[in-house]
Image (spheres, rainbow, N blue to C red):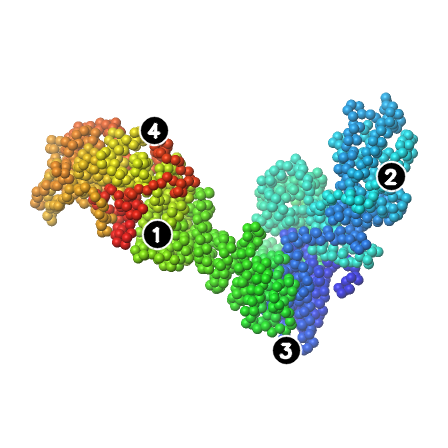
């Protein structure tokens, strides 16, 4: 039959052939399951041959899937056939050829060949859904299956299969082909498809077809041919001229549409002036010429003249417009003239005239508003005149005189114009094509026209087939065009049911709903719902109403938003807002997933009345048990609107639905309708409900895909009688259990976890029928789902090439042969340039070891066919995952030659190719991560090769970072990427390392765009952390090219040190270690022995616990172990909880490690500019707002800068002022920035010009920082203060002027004085009243600082002040004076030297106890007088040691018996006892000057204010002292109680609680003796403590004891910051000369710079108290500068041992 297909006429051929294939596949299924296959082999051979012939060019047709898409259902059907056929090819039960006779062997070979042909034909005709789902067979584990599939592909290529249908544009391409078929013209000018459609289309569709035909044919420049064919047919069928074009034929409608489409502008141009002219203002003239219709007062002759005038004007205007007549209409007129001339020669011209006026000009004259000639409707009299004019014009066109009596006067006018009219018609009917009057077409093909054409062809295809078969032109034209048409329609499938409407009008009821839904809906969601076809409109009911369908099973709760669905329903209904509608609710397979929750159901019901207010009838189709239960559960909600409602009808079958909707108008889903097709019905069954033990009579229907259980008895539901129909898909049936001898069987359901029990007299038959259907489903069920990506036409050569090359290396000879043949056919089909290396030959013997041949083929193609690179590599990666280990190695071998071609696709001008390149890189990365066994080979072959392709390294880095970020820092994916970076860099270390470093620097810069408090919170954090890990991996063995990148690496280190989780912190530490190691081992750089020793020493120190702490690491764990531990995320890391790096730690890392290494290396490298490059990188961030990085950059800038200027310091002060304005109690980022600026100022001050006014102002800035009373800023401010004093002393400022005068003069500026006074009052420490005690008041707080560094620095500053005073006074440093007493008192509890240099007047001989008690001792060797300081002489052994505070001898003080009250034995122990042991005489103490240097000398300290402040300081120290300090202070307080008895009461007032504590906790006699003396002298004095406190307040020192207490809370910072801000702004605006520095001018070359040879103070924070120098040793510091090269260093460092070694090796 198929061989004689051209001689046969099919009805619904595609559907018919699909049905035959389906039946024959059942035969094949039965044969494959038969136990007697040899006997049935010939039947199988014949059946498969028939299937192969039927599948030629046969598009599969099936019902749409449940999601509404035909493609998925078609794919499922394809896979069903494919699995069946492939199983038939590789039947494991087939005997070997050795066991078969010759006939059987021939039959077996023939069967295999027919099966391969069937698969080839199936795949060729359905390539768009088949190739993607079958391509995986080329990698099947069974080699025979693979070989068979390669043969299929070879045959597919040999058949010349077109792969264009794989394109994304396949749908539009098919529509273009559809238009091409319809507009196809035969050799004789015939249009077979178009004319067939024109002859069978119903009258209701003619208007739509006319629009489509005119638009399409005009766009194809074939409108003339269409009109010729249509006019010819119309004229041939006309009986006479009078009936021509008089009916509502398609010709008439096409002619009318042409007039409307092409003549609108022409009509408007010629008619608008005419009609406007006759509408004169006022009373228009009358044109009535019928005497019976004249109004009173009208004159007949006048009206006749008016009408004749207007008619003549109209006629003359129209006649004169022949040249402006539209070209398309002229062409139509010419066509009409030629056709009529052939049949009615004498009437050809009149036919033209009649058509032009009757259907074109006259309708526009009569109805000018409707034709948009004028905007307003003419008056009735004018309308009457226009109508009479058209009668005259039409008679002229028809060449006929009037017969009406009242029109006879106009016949003369008609006779006069007959010839002119004839000439006009002749002129417009002339052949315009040769005359060049054709204008460019204005028609274009729109989607609406395409969809309309599709729908018209689909609905009328069978009628068209019948017409073509019976047509007399059938033999001339043949069936070929129609066969193409029905095949193309089969590919396109049925058209959409609903029509697209442009109407945006909403009713009042729907408008509110639309506004509500607009909040939830969007175009994408609504389009998705439209394609799912949950709710759609199709067809009409018997009442003529549009019918809507709601498919309940397509709504999935949780997957579809009910509000979006409601919006979709509203949009679908809006076109029929004013019309009654009917709704069919298809409840087939309704279950728990398809229900609405109660809240959603309420919303639907609440809005339902407005949405369905015009509902005519509603139908519930296939109501089942679950729907019944669902309705009963919500009966209270549903009853008010649905119970007993006659508009609601329950329907259980399509036959029942046919009572309301004709069968040809029903548009239920095919999956619903097909349930009733090919069913086997079993009546008389009973269903047992186990929960109620009740039997219900049912009918069982077993279909091809489902089982229906329909109840016989009706159930009452919502006051309706309902037949329940439970439908179960065959896929849900898990097992059929037959109970013997009881006529009972059981269906076990897979998803519901329950069973259905049935009774039937013939239960065996029922069970067997269900089992047979289930077996068929199981055998046809697709278990071959492919994970292959969608294949495009351009993918085919590369995909098949990889399949051929990979299988060519197989161990199976038949598979190698099939692969070789495929390779040959592929080369020929796609014209691949193989340089004559291939020749297809049957029975070719190919050895298994042919790797070199495969690689050579691949290399040749990689060079000659490089455009296939992306597709080939993509398929290589896909096939790699499915291959064995041996084949994977082969795949890597032939992949490698293609990798260099990737550089072709990285150009930014072609974004599509760049995206494809990125896809390939992502897949290669995934392959690297997943293929653990192939990891080394992939690293070497793939990434080693890609690393040599310089052009794509940026793309590779992008992909690496993206994939690493996907897994997150520390994930296996990120670690593999970091390790793979090493393989990439191996081929081009210099380029790749530069790109990684540059990328990291750019990411750091991007953090400034949207700054965050810390880096871990930034969106770019993952990229930063991942790139940092890359740097660590590359840093070993100098893969970072340190010779060229050291400044950038150090810059990155300072920005990222101690950030992120511990592994990342360890990574930065490891990076620094590896960098130093690379410097030591780098062959590019040659260093001296001293430099090498410095580097080696740095390596050693990096592993010390102190440096672990600096990098934020656990001292007890190895940094390398932490950096490379297997699990990064032992604990979840939160960016908000990470401890930020203390800025002093960064200062230490920069100054004592990185900078020292840099400078040591620079000495051995001529013209090295590393330091300037580092400085330039740092400046970028130092002057940009970025809370996470700017503080770090400022600290580093201060450490590494070798120059500065007033302008730069001024800008730093501006930043500080801005930061102070933004200080917030809960915001610490600004505090960190202020601290960084203070540190930078500390480091930059020595670089300022000596005459800069900033030196003195920085003293007050440092004091103001201390006044902020913030613990972190206090330490930084103390460092700035120390540096300032050292710098000014080095300049000799204190040689001839006391510090008080120097510093007070700096604040006497008019613009500053007000702010300073305000600050003094706020802090309650007055510098004007007593400068030195005000300083001490600020410094005392340093003793309470939690940092030992700050405490030590406080002691050094006090000693510095003593030294500065001594230099001015030309006296000993410890000489007691009004200027020095404040500092001596402050140092008293912490300085043994102060206590030994300053004596007391009232000392008793001290005792040395024997074994029975305490022994008092004295210093037998007092230190020599303090010499003039020269230069620092620290030793490696002692320079950083902090000496312990020695407990001084405690004297016994005599008490004043007169003043001693009786405390009683119980309150105070008896202190008047002699100590045990012998009494030793107290030796005379050496003092610092030639005379006695008494600390509390009433002759020196004569004024009341000094004494009051002195005792207040002593009391404050005692109040805040620890136990050892308190013992010392009580001794001197006892002394003060006797020396200054009148002022002493203030001590008791401030120290009362401390005295009580001493009495309770200090058991030694010396302390108790001192306490007793204090108490007795306090009591003996006048009770004037309150007066002293008042005097202290009046002096401006009310805050002396308060400020030295605990550090203030953050909440108290804002007020002080505000005052400081005002002061800074005043200083900036009035006291600092020089130009302004803008952020973009922050490079070193733009600043007014100069360097000075000065020394820096120790502004670094040391590692521990043990690393600090003692106050005694600090006294020997040289206050003049020492210079090392062009850089200035602190006089102390974190490690004296380190300093000692570096002094020996030529370091600092």
First-in-chain label (4 vs 2): 2
Task: Residue at 59% x, 66% y: name it.
Answer: 804
Residue holding disc 4: 1311
Q: Alpha-carbon distance for marks 3 and 1?
A: 85 Å
Q: Is residue 810 left or right of residue 1467?
A: right
The N terminus - image quarter = bottom right
The image position of residue 966, as x and y in percent, is: 49, 52
Q: Residue 98 — which label?
A: 3
The image position of residue 1516, as x and y in percent, is: 23, 36
Residue holding disc 1: 1162
Q: Quadrant of residue 186?
A: bottom right
Q: Alpha-carbon distance for marks 2 and 1?
A: 105 Å
The residue carrying pointer 4 sits among few (fewer than 14), some (14 to 19) or many (20 or more) residues within 10 Å by Cα, namely: some
For the residues bearing labels 3 and 2, Cβ distance under 8 angstroms: no
In the rendered image, the residue lying farthest to the top is 297
Please, what secondary structure does the residue beneath circle 4 have? helix
User: Is residue 453 at all visible to an observer of this figure?
Assistant: yes
The image position of residue 388, as x and y in percent, is: 85, 32
Q: Alpha-carbon distance for marks 4 and 3?
A: 115 Å
Task: Residue at 38% x, 40% y: name it.
Answer: 1647
For the residues bearing labels 2 and 1, Cβ distance under 8 angstroms: no
For the residues carrying marks 2 and 1, which lies nearer the camera in this image?
Answer: 1
Q: Which of 99/1490 is in front? A: 1490
First-in-chain label (2 vs 1): 2
Q: Is residue 1681 left or right of residue 798?
A: left
Task: Residue at 12% x, 41% y: name it.
Answer: 1485
User: Is residue 698 at all visible to an observer of this figure?
Assistant: no
Residue holding disc 2: 422
Q: Quadrant of residue 902?
A: bottom right
């Amino acid at each position: 039959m198929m061989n004689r297909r051209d001689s046969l006429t099919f009805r619904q051929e595609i559907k018919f052939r699909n049905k035959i294939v389906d039946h024959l596949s059942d035969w094949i299924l039965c044969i494959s399951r038969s136990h007697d296959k040899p006997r049935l082999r010939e039947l199988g051979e014949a059946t498969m041959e028939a299937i192969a012939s039927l599948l030629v060019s046969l598009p599969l047709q099936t019902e749409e899937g449940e999601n509404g898409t035909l493609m998925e259902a078609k794919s499922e059907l394809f896979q069903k056939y494919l699995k069946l056929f492939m199983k038939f090819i590789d039947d494991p039960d087939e005997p070997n050829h050795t066991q078969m006779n010759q006939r059987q062997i021939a039959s077996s070979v023939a069967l295999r060949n027919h099966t391969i042909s069937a698969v080839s034909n199936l795949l060729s005709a359905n390539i768009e859904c088949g190739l993607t789902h079958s391509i995986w067979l080329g990698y099947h584990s069974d080699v025979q299956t693979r070989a068979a599939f390669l043969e299929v592909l070879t045959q597919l290529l040999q058949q010349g299969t077109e792969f264009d249908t794989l394109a994304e544009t396949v749908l539009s391409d098919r529509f273009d082909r559809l238009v091409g078929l319809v507009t196809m013209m035969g050799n004789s000018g015939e249009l077979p498809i178009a004319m067939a459609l024109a002859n069978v289309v119903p009258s209701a569709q003619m208007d739509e077809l006319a629009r489509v035909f005119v638009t399409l044919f005009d766009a194809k420049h074939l409108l003339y041919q269409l009109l010729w064919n249509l006019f010819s047919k119309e004229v041939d069928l006309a009986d006479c001229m009078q009936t021509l074009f008089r009916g509502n034929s398609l010709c008439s409608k096409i002619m009318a549409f042409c007039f409307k489409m092409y003549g609108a502008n022409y009509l408007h141009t010629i008619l608008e002036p005419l009609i406007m002219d006759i509408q004169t203002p006022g009373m228009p003239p009358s044109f009535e010429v019928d005497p019976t219709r004249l109004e009173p007062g009208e004159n007949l002759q006048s009206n006749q003249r008016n009408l004749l005038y207007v008619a003549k004007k109209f006629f003359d205007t129209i006649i004169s417009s022949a040249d402006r007549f539209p070209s398309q209409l002229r062409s139509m007129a010419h066509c009409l003239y030629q056709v009529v001339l052939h049949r009615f020669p004498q009437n050809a011209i009149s036919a033209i005239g009649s058509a032009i006026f009757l259907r074109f000009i006259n309708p526009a004259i009569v109805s000018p508003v409707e034709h948009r000639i004028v905007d307003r409707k003419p008056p009735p009299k004018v309308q009457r005149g226009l109508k009479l004019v058209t009668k005259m014009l039409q008679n002229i066109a028809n060449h006929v005189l009037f017969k009406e009596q009242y029109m006879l006067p106009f016949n003369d006018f008609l006779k006069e114009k007959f010839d002119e009219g004839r000439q006009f018609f002749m002129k417009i009917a002339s052949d315009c094509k040769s005359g060049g009057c054709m204008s460019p077409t204005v028609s274009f093909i729109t989607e609406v026209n395409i969809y309309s054409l599709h729908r018209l062809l689909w609905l009328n295809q069978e009628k068209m087939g019948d017409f073509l078969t019976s047509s007399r032109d059938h033999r001339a034209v043949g069936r070929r065009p129609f066969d193409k048409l029905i095949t193309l329609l089969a590919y396109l499938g049925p058209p959409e049911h609903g029509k697209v409407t442009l109407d945006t009008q909403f009713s009042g009821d729907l408008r509110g709903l639309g506004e509500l839904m607009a909040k939830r809906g969007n175009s994408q969601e609504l389009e998705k719902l439209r394609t799912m076809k949950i709710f759609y409109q199709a067809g009409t009911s018997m009442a003529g109403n549009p019918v809507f369908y709601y498919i309940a099973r397509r709504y999935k709760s949780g997957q579809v938003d009910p509000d979006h669905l409601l919006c979709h329903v509203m949009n679908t209904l809006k076109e029929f807002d004013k019309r009654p509608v009917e709704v069919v609710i298809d409840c087939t397979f309704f279950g728990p997933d398809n229900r609405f929750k109660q809240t959603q159901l309420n919303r639907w019901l609440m809005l339902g009345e407005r949405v369905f207010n015009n509902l005519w009838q509603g139908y519930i189709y296939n109501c089942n048990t679950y729907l019944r239960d669902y309705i009963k559960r919500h009966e209270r909600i549903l009853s008010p609107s649905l119970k007993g409602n006659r508009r609601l009808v329950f329907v259980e079958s399509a036959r029942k639905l046919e009572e309301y909707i004709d069968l040809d108008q029903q548009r239920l889903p095919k999956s619903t309708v097909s349930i009733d097709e090919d069913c086997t019905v079993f009546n008389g069954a009973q269903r047992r409900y186990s929960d109620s033990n009740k039997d219900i009579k049912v009918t069982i229907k077993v279909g091809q895909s489902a089982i229906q259980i329909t109840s016989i008895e009706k159930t009452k539901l919502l006051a309706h009688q309902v037949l329940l129909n439970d439908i179960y898909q065959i896929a849900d049936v898990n097992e059929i259990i037959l109970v013997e001898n009881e006529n009972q069987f059981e269906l076990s359901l897979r998803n519901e976890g329950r069973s259905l029990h049935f009774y039937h007299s013939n239960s065996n038959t029922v069970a067997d029928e269900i089992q047979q259907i289930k077996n068929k489903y199981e055998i046809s069920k697709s278990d071959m789902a492919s994970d292959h990506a969608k294949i495009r036409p351009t993918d085919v050569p590369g995909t098949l090439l990889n399949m051929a090359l990979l299988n060519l290396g197989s161990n199976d000879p038949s598979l190698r042969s099939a692969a070789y043949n495929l390779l040959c056919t592929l080369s020929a089909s796609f014209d691949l340039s193989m340089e004559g290396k291939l020749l297809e030959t049957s029975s070719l013997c190919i050895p298994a070891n042919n790797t070199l041949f495969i690689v050579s083929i691949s290399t040749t193609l990689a060079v000659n066919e490089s455009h296939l690179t992306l597709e080939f590599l993509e398929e290589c990666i896909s096939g790699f995952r499915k291959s064995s280990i041996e084949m994977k190695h082969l795949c890597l071998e032939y992949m490698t030659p293609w990798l260099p071609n990737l550089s072709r696709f990285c150009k930014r001008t072609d974004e599509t190719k760049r995206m494809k390149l990125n896809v390939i890189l992502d897949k290669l990365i995934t392959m690297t991560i997943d293929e653990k066994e192939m990891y080394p080979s992939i690293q070497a072959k793939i990434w080693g090769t890609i690393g040599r392709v310089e052009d794509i390294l940026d793309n590779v880095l992008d992909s690496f970072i993206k994939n690493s970020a996907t897994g997150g820092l520390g994930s296996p994916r990120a670690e593999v990427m970091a390790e793979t970076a090493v393989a990439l860099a191996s081929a081009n270390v210099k380029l790749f390392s530069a790109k990684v470093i540059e990328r990291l620097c750019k990411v750091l810069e991007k953090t400034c765009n949207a700054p965050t408090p810390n880096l871990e919170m930034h969106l770019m954090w993952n990229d930063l952390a991942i790139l940092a890990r890359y740097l660590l991996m590359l840093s070993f063995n100098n893969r970072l090219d340190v010779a060229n990148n050291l400044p950038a690496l150090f810059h990155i280190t300072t920005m990222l040190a101690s950030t992120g989780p511990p592994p990342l912190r360890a990574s930065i530490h490891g990076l620094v270690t590896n960098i130093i190691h690379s410097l030591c081992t780098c062959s590019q750089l040659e260093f001296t022995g001293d430099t090498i020793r410095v580097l080696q020493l740095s390596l050693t120190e990096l592993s010390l616990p102190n440096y672990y702490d600096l990098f934020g690491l656990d001292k007890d764990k190895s940094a390398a172990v932490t950096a490379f531990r297997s699990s990064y995320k032992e604990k979840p890391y939160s960016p908000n909880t990470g401890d930020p790096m203390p800025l002093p730690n960064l200062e230490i890392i920069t100054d004592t490690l990185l900078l020292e290494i840099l400078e040591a290396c620079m000495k051995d490298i001529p013209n090295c500019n590393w330091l300037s490059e580092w400085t330039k990188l740092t400046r970028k961030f130092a002057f940009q707002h970025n809370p996470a990085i700017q503080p770090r950059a400022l600290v580093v800038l201060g450490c590494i800068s070798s120059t500065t200027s007033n302008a730069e310091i001024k800008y730093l002060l501006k930043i500080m002022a801005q930061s102070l304005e933004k200080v917030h109690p809960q915001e610490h980022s600004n505090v960190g920035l202020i601290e960084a600026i203070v540190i930078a100022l500390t480091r930059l001050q020595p670089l300022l010009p000596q005459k800069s006014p900033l030196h003195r102002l920085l003293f007050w800035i440092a004091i103001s920082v201390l006044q902020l009373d913030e613990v972190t800023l206090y330490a930084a401010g103390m460092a700035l203060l120390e540096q300032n004093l050292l710098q000014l002393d080095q300049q000799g400022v204190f040689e001839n002027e006391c510090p008080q005068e120097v510093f007070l003069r700096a604040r006497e500026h008019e613009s500053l004085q007000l702010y300073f006074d305000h600050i003094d009052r706020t802090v309650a420490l007055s510098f004007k009243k007593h400068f030195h005690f005000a300083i001490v008041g600020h410094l005392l707080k340093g003793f309470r600082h939690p940092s030992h560094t700050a405490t030590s620095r406080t002691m050094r500053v006090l000693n510095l002040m003593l030294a500065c005073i001594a230099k001015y006074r030309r006296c000993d440093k410890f000489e007691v004076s009004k200027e020095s007493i404040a500092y001596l008192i402050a140092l008293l509890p912490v300085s043994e030297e102060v206590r030994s240099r300053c004596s007391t007047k009232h000392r008793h001989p001290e005792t040395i106890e024997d074994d029975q008690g305490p022994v008092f001792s004295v210093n037998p060797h007092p230190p020599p007088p303090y010499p003039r300081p020269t230069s620092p002489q620290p030793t490696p052994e002692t320079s950083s040691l902090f000496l312990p505070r020695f407990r001084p001898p405690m004297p016994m003080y005599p008490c004043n018996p007169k003043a001693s009250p009786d405390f009683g034995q119980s309150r105070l122990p008896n202190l008047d006892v002699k100590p045990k042991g012998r009494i030793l005489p107290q030796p005379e103490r050496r003092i610092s000057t030639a005379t006695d240097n008494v600390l509390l000398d009433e002759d020196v300290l004569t004024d009341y204010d000094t004494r009051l402040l002195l005792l207040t300081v002593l009391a404050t120290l005692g109040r805040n002292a620890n136990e050892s300090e308190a013992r010392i202070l009580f001794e001197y307080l006892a002394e003060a109680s006797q020396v200054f008895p009148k002022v002493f009461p203030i001590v008791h007032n401030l120290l009362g609680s401390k005295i009580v504590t001493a009495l309770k906790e200090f058991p030694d006699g010396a302390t108790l003796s001192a306490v007793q003396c204090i108490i007795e002298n306090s009591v003996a004095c006048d009770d004037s403590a309150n007066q002293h406190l008042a005097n202290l307040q009046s002096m401006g020192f009310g805050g002396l004891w308060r400020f030295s207490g605990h550090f203030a809370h953050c909440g108290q910072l804002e007020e002080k910051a505000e005052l400081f801000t005002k002061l800074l702004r005043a200083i900036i605006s009035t006291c600092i000369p020089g130009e302004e520095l803008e952020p973009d001018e922050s490079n070193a070359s733009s600043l007014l710079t100069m360097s000075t040879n000065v020394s820096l103070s120790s502004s670094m924070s040391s590692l521990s108290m043990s690393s600090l120098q003692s106050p005694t040793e600090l006294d020997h510091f040289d206050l003049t500068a020492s210079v090392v090269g062009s850089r200035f260093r602190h006089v102390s460092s974190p490690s004296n041992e380190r300093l000692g070694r570096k002094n020996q090796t030529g370091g600092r």
